[in-house]
Image: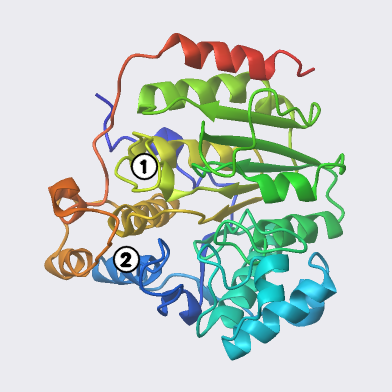
Amino acid sequence: MLSSGGLDELAFATGTYKAPVLITHPAFSNPGFGKHHPLSIMRHAAFLDTCAALGWLEGQDIREAPLADRAVLARFHASDYLDALEKCARTTVVDREARERYNIGSMECPVFDGLWERICASVGGSILAADLALEGFLPFHPGGGTHHGRADRASGFCYSNDPVFAILRLLDAGLESVLYVDLDAHHGDGVEIAFSSDPRVHLLSLHEEGRWPGTGGLDDIHGPRTINVPLPKYINDSEYLYIFHEINRRWLQRLTPEAVVITCGADALFGDPLTSMHLSNYALTSVVAECVKLSNRAIILGGGGYNPWNTARLWSKIWADMNRFSIPECLPRDAMKTLAELACDLVDDDEMHPHWLTSIADAGNSGAIRETCEARVSQCCATRP
């Protein structure tokens, strides 16, 4: 059984970075997406309240994400799409054309009060994260990671694509090799499409097979700069760590990227209502830490996560690991109260696990490594130089 402690050898703070920085904005803690949407959960506020109850925000470098303006958004997004998006977001009224052409106002991507501010904060936060990484800091932007957004269309709960803006900022600074690692349970299709023809950007996506958006298969080849690994259902920690470590050994460590951008979706954790992966937050944070070590410039973004307890706990653990905070076995009363007050229509009472309310770190979920995992590593790496 893997331990949830003993992460010293995987710690984020290796001496390469000046200090961790947390990027946040009130928009991420406000209600959004409507009453029954998977992202209506109050995960960002719960993360901040949990960290505050543990004393993990006192004296720390916490920055408010600047709001990206229209000119900044137009660097990637089409003008007509931005026109429709801004109008619908500000009025919360959607006409048929906007819904059909841009996927705005659909059940997937609804409009709600505060949507435009949230979009601008997400993009502005990722640009700030890139600037901080270039200055030698290690930024964590949990409100980022909207990796499905297209240049001309909303997609997969994402209206913009803030990882794209972070990468563009790094490239603007003159970097010639940027690695994007997507650990979300869903394939990072929007980022892959955005940089499909840019030789300066390498991409790795570890995602669950058979999941929306249906891309990122083993036969979905975008040349030697991209590795897509569709993970078998019910993947455990041992399999996940094996796959990552093999790809890291065979490919990532030889890239020597000048910067790494990581989207670490909490929907890869056991108990997420939209996926069937069986990972602990030990395994996921271990891989994030290993990715950070690949360069002296790194950015950590949030991403998916539709179990509010697990998402708040994962983000809290990432922040604790970044700062080398000691994680208590049992949370203080105020932190437990924060987690107990969360709600999610997609998680039934009999699916709740007691430790979601009382602790931050999961026990590991080790198990046998299936032959299919070994085969997929070999196939993914076979064509890489």
Residue 269's disc number: 1
Q: Position of residue 69 (x, y in %)?
A: 74, 82
Q: Position of residue 300 (x, y in %)?
A: 55, 53
In front of the other: 27 or 349: 349
Residue at 53% of width from left, 41% of height from top?
183
In front of the other: 18 or 3: 3
Q: Is residue 354 visible?
A: yes
Amino acid at dot 2: Cys
Q: Which residue is mark 2?
A: 51
The C terminus, quarter of image? top right
Residue at 43% of width from left, 70% of height from top?
60
Q: Secondary structure at mark 1?
A: loop
Q: Earlier in the sequence, mark 1 or mark 2?
A: 2
5 horizontally vs 224: left or right: left
Residue at 60% of width from left, 90% of height from top?
91
Identify whether 4 is placed above or below 96. above
Residue at 69% of width from left, 77% of height from top?
85
Q: Position of residue 75 (x, y in %)?
A: 83, 68
Q: Secondary structure at mark 2?
A: helix
Asked if the residue under mark 2 is in contact with the one under mark 1, i.e. CB atoms within 8 Å, the reply is no
Amino acid at dot 1: Leu
Crowding at mark 2 (Cα within 10 Å: few <14, some 14-19, many 20+)? many
Identify whether 336 is placed above or below 262. below
The N terminus, quarter of image? top left
34 horizontally vs 248: left or right: left
